[in-house]
Image (spheres, rainbow, N blue to C red):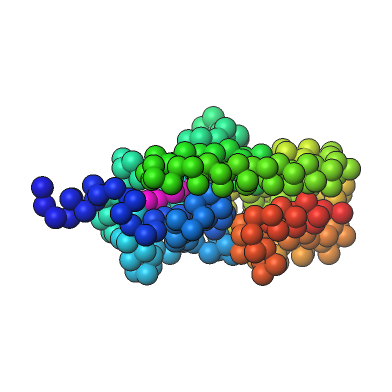
């Protein structure tokens, strides 16, 4: 056995910290809450970036190369950028078949799985909608999954991870009750989205998405589709356009001029806006944005 593989097999307890690479900030926030002082999270994408399109820069390759483990969202959200990083980093600890690799999408129930997948449907996700973290109940599932994962690779700190998870769950459950009360009167409201990244949030709180500014996922809005959407808005009278932070609001503004429909910016991750500093502030914002 050569020196490289010997080091790979050393128990994690010999290290002062675990360097856990994660694809998105929300994963980093959960992981840090459970891991506490025994881990360092290395977040690959920024919260205000389009999560579908991340440039695999050399700096990200270096981060992957030095990671002790990798946690990804999955459901093919990272399909265009994470596999090249994994391959170029050549780190056995971040390979999909490694015990130090975690795909979160395998642990939640995905919705909106397409019956057919081809180019005519746009940039569809064959496994289902990948934005599952925007249902606050799913955060509890992800926290439990990450707790079990950290214990599996670092048995020495098992009791600490369990205690941190228990504390996180208790506080998060209180927040869920608060958000449910805040959103109760919004149940049944109709909304327009730019992209259906709020599917789980809408399902949780009973919002009805009646259309998207994108004619198909990943396809820029056309004049024909925009005019049809304006007619739909005049007929259905939705409350607002729920818009992400990473696409231009130009088309939404045009629709607003023609219909009077307000644009509501809806951040998708920690750091998507300056005020979104953690998971709680993300959902505080989301549940307070729709009037």
> Is the residue 68 above or below the residue 184 in the image?
below
Q: Residue at x 68, y 42 (%)?
A: 170
Q: Residue furthest left?
A: 1
State which quadrant residue 3 falls in. Answer: bottom left
Q: Which of the image's four quarters has the C terminus?
A: bottom right
The residue lying toward the viewer, choosing from 223 and 63, is 63
For this orientation, the residue located farthest to the top is 115
Q: Does any portion of residue 265 appear in the rendered image?
A: yes
The percent coordinates of residue 223 (x first, y second) are 69, 58
Image: 282 above or below 100: below
Please state the extent of the stretch shown in magenta in the rendering: 69-73
Going 56% across and 53% down the picture, which residue do you hit?
33
Locate residue 74, reporting x and y percent. 47, 44
Residue 64 seen from this side: no
Residue 278 position within the rendered picture, expressed as x and y whole percent measured from the top left:
64, 59
Find residue 113 and report its horizontal and vertical position in percent: 56, 33
């Amino acid at each position: 056995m050569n020196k490289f593989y010997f080091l790979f097999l050393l128990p994690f307890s010999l290290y002062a910290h675990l360097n856990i690479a994660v694809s998105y900030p929300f994963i980093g926030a959960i992981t840090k809450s459970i891991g506490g002082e025994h881990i360092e999270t290395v977040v690959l994408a920024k919260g205000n970036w389009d999560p579908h399109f991340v440039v695999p820069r050399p700096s990200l390759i270096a981060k992957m190369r030095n990671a002790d483990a990798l946690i990804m969202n999955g459901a093919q959200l990272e399909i265009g950028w994470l596999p090249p990083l994994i391959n170029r980093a050549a780190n056995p600890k971040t390979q999909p078949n490694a015990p130090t690799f975690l795909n979160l999408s395998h642990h939640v129930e995905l919705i909106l799985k397409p019956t057919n997948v081809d180019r005519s449907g746009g940039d569809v996700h064959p496994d289902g909608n990948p934005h599952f973290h925007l249902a606050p109940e799913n955060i509890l599932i992800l926290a439990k999954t990450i707790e079990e994962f950290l214990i599996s690779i670092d048995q020495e700190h098992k009791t600490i991870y369990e205690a941190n998870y228990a504390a996180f769950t208790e506080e998060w459950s209180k927040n869920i009750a608060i958000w449910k009360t805040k959103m109760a009167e919004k149940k049944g409201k109709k909304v327009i989205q730019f992209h259906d990244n709020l599917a789980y949030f809408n399902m949780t709180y009973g919002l009805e998405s009646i259309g998207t500014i994108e004619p198909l996922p990943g396809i820029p809005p056309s004049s024909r589709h925009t005019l049809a959407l304006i007619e739909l808005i005049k007929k259905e009278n939705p409350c607002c356009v729920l818009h992400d932070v990473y696409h231009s609001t130009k088309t939404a503004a045009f629709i607003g001029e023609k219909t009077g429909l307000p644009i509501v910016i809806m951040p998708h991750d920690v750091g998507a806006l300056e005020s979104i500093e953690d998971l709680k502030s993300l959902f505080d914002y989301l549940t307070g944005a729709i009037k």
